Amino acid sequence: MNDTTLPHIVKGGIGASPKRVEDRRFLSGRGHYTDDINRPGQTYAVFKRSDVAHGVIRSIDTSAARAMPGVVAIFTGDDIAKAGIGGVPCGWQIHSKDGSPMVEPPHPVLAQGKVRYVGDAVAMVIAETVDQAKDAAEALVIDIDPLPAVSNMIAATAEGAALVHDDAKGNVCFDWHIGDKDAVDAAFAKAHKVATIDLVNNRLVPNPIEPRAAIGDFDQSTGEHTLYTTSQNPHVIRLLMGAFVLQIPEHKLRVVAPDVGGGFGAKIFHYIEEAAVTWAAAQVNRPVKWTCERSESFITDAHGRDHITHAELALAEDGAFLGLRVKTMANLGAYLSTFAPSVPTYLSATLLAGVYTTPAIYSEVKAIFTNTVPVDAYRGAGRPETTFLLERLVDVAAKTMGMDRVAIRRRNFIPADAYPYQTPVALQYDSGNHEATLARCMELADWSGFEARRAESAKRGKLRGIGMSTYLEACGIAPSAVAGALGARAGLYEVANVKVHPTGSVTLYTGTHSHGQGHETTFAQLVADQLGVPFEQVEIVHGDTSKIPFGMGTYGSRSLAVGGSAIVKAVDKIIAKSKKIAAHLMEASVDDIEFKDGKFTVAGTDKSKAFGEIALTAYVPHNYPHEELEPGLDETAFYDPKNFTFPGGCHICEVEVDPDTGVVNLLNFTAVDDIGRVINPMIVHGQVHGGVAQGIGQALLEHAVYDETGQLLSGSLMDYTMPRADNLVNIHVGTESTMCTHNPLGAKGVGEVGAIGSPPAVINAVVDALRDYGVTHIDMPATPQKIWSIINAATPRMAAE
Amino acid sequence: MPQVKLTVNGKPATAEVEARTLLVEMLRENLHLTGTHVGCDTSQCGACVVKIDGKSVKSCTMLAVQANGSEVTTIEGLAAADGTLHPMQEMFREHHGLQCGFCTPGMVMSAIDLVESHPEGLTEQQIREELEGNICRCTGYHNIVKAIAAAWPLMHGRELPQAAE
Ligand code: FES
Ligand code: FES
């Protein structure tokens, strides 16, 4: 695809960086987040949560709590069971190697019989004020018999380990594989050398700065339930909660996700609190509001990553990759969160070719239950895990072969002219140019000048290192038929409804959801560009199931690639209908009508009609082709993607290690990404900055740590190291794009590239800095303690040499 | 219940609160000023920063009764009566210093205090270090740092002195 297939550029349209529409309200304190909403007569809910990781609930005595001031109601697992309320469902089903379906234990809204992680909700207390609800929750007498807990995958898979769910033998949820085992065995049989790595992808806590919140409201006169929630995808919540948990039909259930303060995946999932407040509101006949506290989010928001992997790469004499063999254990936590099974499988192992021509790949994944918070998608979801594994392994391979790290990458790149490229693990990449992103990134990062900088650092007694990652990821998921065949229990299309008003202004209703991505700006640019109307005359609406026909929300960098494509399709319908109206008004044939710069003209004449005149005619149809057309100008489009999109690029990181303290000082970070069509460069750069910051956080700072009894040790912002301003540097961002070939925009998506490409670049740099210490791998986060220990353990040996 | 009297954004404001009510709770729940946010329960994130008698304070770390008699400025009180944004707000907008907007009110309030208390000038490194008490999960801080540096000359009416490093 090239630029000529797209409409012309208008001011504020594609390629421009108008300031964001949403900023004025956010900067003046007029954002409208869930916790800012208060409904008349509202009550407050507090959840009493298990403080042991595993145990049998013997009894819950609510009598003293019920007598406390302000208490309206108290519900336990028994009440939920009696009301016939279902468990929160899982949206993706994986089958094991032997064809058997994954073990899918129920996930009750309030714990029944057993608690399975610290944070598992045992009771819900509803009172007139939050403080009264908290006080009453303290007065509950809960008798739990503790059971032995398994707090990590090693413990969970040991002989005789306690079982999180009785029907998941060995705590295994599924044992899955992909690829051609025999072809890989054959590749290893003829390998010149084999590079090997064992690594852990550290467990993370997403921590959007807005804690989750939910308000249930029930209208007795209409029987309509409303849920206000901090969600990335309100329609999905309506579908899952209405159909599977509470049995409320869609026409009686409205889900509103207003301004949402960051998601990063953690707000995709359907959480028990959403169902609890929606149900309880109808029970107490008053609105019920719950706002999560940060320490509560640490033990209830789904965590991310937590994989243990062993991988081997078979290499030919010239450094060509012959075959890749991967064995991964993935932690699912105590229950299956909404999309958990897809993360280590189809979002992960299908990317194992990366940007390389590896002809044979085989991967096995065992998914394990543990007594920890459920684990699910976190920015990148599966792709950061695979990218970290591959890009670390390629550096190890370079060392094994005695080759340069850049040369071995170039030797194995999929050439730009080999696209479309079929990988051995199901995906067909449509476009990319890895040499272009590599070359540009190396130039921006001054890769060739590095040795001089290293020497300069050495003079100051510091260890300088540089590292890169050349990565590719899959997003814009996905063709519904493909996703369905792979186990998805939902479609993955997107919806846009474009309403042109009589005076020519436009409201766009999108099924995607913006929680920081700036859709109100980018989508307005897109519509303005296509229709030739001023950017300011376009209003974007999202986040309310009562206004938007349908939608799958925002995750997996899909908003522009899938949601934007739906918008283009809907606007195309508007233009097609407008042409017919214009043809009628100008007494010409539709085929002769051209549309450009917001004007309809009859080809070869000076006759023209402005877009606004057509809009007015559509709503005041006095002179109108009534036999052929209905009045009005309002079109809806569903867009089902034809393939995944494949953003990629090159990230380079430069660090300096202080050998006395082990502190890694970040010096430089450069990201050059291929994300397809860019609508708003300012917003795109911002997305990359934020993603890279999270990737650097994973590489150097963040780690969710459980002790052996299942207590989360890093359970507050005092203990869990979030990246702060002084942990980071300015991030140099460039784009070097090839167009996506199968969607009308050419857009690939940018939300996750930063978090996917960056962690291996950082660790490759740290390992490079420690090149004289015999280090081939360091697990994330590369804390001062780890580095200092490595340096100290090696120093006597080096001194002796 | 104790009565707390404040001047908030230039106007008198009174509320009956429990002794344990935090200032941020009084602002959000009693005075309906929901621009000030709560992002944590350990005084780490800075989403709740407001100005009390000219100094930036984490309003989740102070009881409402402790603020009795004070002058409080919240994010809602920064723009001029005609809607003209404060230079710090304007620079956050200009430099894309916000994404989801949740950390933003506290970030802007802290940034204003930071610039006001450094009339001698500010280096990028200083800005980064002094932002220690404010967490943003969205932006990677890159554009926040840029916005603060850009607001300095507007707030002090002269060029930002080159760092004497
Ligand atoms: S809410 Fe005050 S510091 Fe987090
Ligand atoms: S803009 Fe989202 S937390 Fe800062």
Image (cartoon, coloured by chain):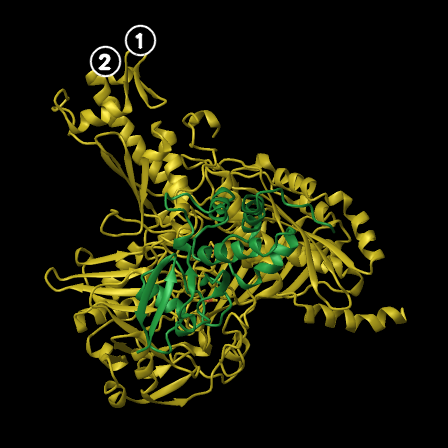
Chain colours: A yellow, B green
State whether label 1 is within 8 Å of ligand 2.
no
Figure quadrant of the C terminus of chain A: bottom right
Is there one chain holding both mark 2 and mark 1? Answer: yes
- Position in image of residue A174 (x %, y %): 44, 68
Q: Dot 2 corresponds to which residue?
A: A588
Label of residue A743 in the image: none
Disc assigned to residue A605: 1
Q: Secondary structure at mark 2?
A: loop
| Chain designation of label 2 | A
Q: Are marks 2 and 1 in contact (CB under 8 Å)?
A: yes
In the rendered image, residue A607, in percent from the top left (x then y), is placed at 28, 11
- Asked if disc 2 is less than 8 Å from ligand 2, the answer is no
Q: Is residue A354 visible?
A: no
Q: Is residue A53 left or right of residue A384?
A: left
Q: Amino acid at mark 1?
A: Thr
- Is B80 situated left or right of A717 in this image? left
Q: Amino acid at mark 2?
A: Ala
Viewer-closest of A144 and A193: A144
Q: Is residue A72 left or right of residue A751?
A: left
Choose between A98 and A162: the one closer to the eye: A162
Tell me where residue A21 appears, x and y as whole percent: 39, 42
Q: Residue at x 27, y 81 (%)?
A: A76
The numbered mark 1 sits on a residue in which chain?
Answer: A
Q: Is residue A459 above or below residue B84?
A: below
Image coordinates of residue A402 in percent, x first then y, are 78, 53
Q: Earlier in the sequence, mark 2 or mark 1?
A: 2
Label 2 and label 1: CA atoms lie apart by 11 Å
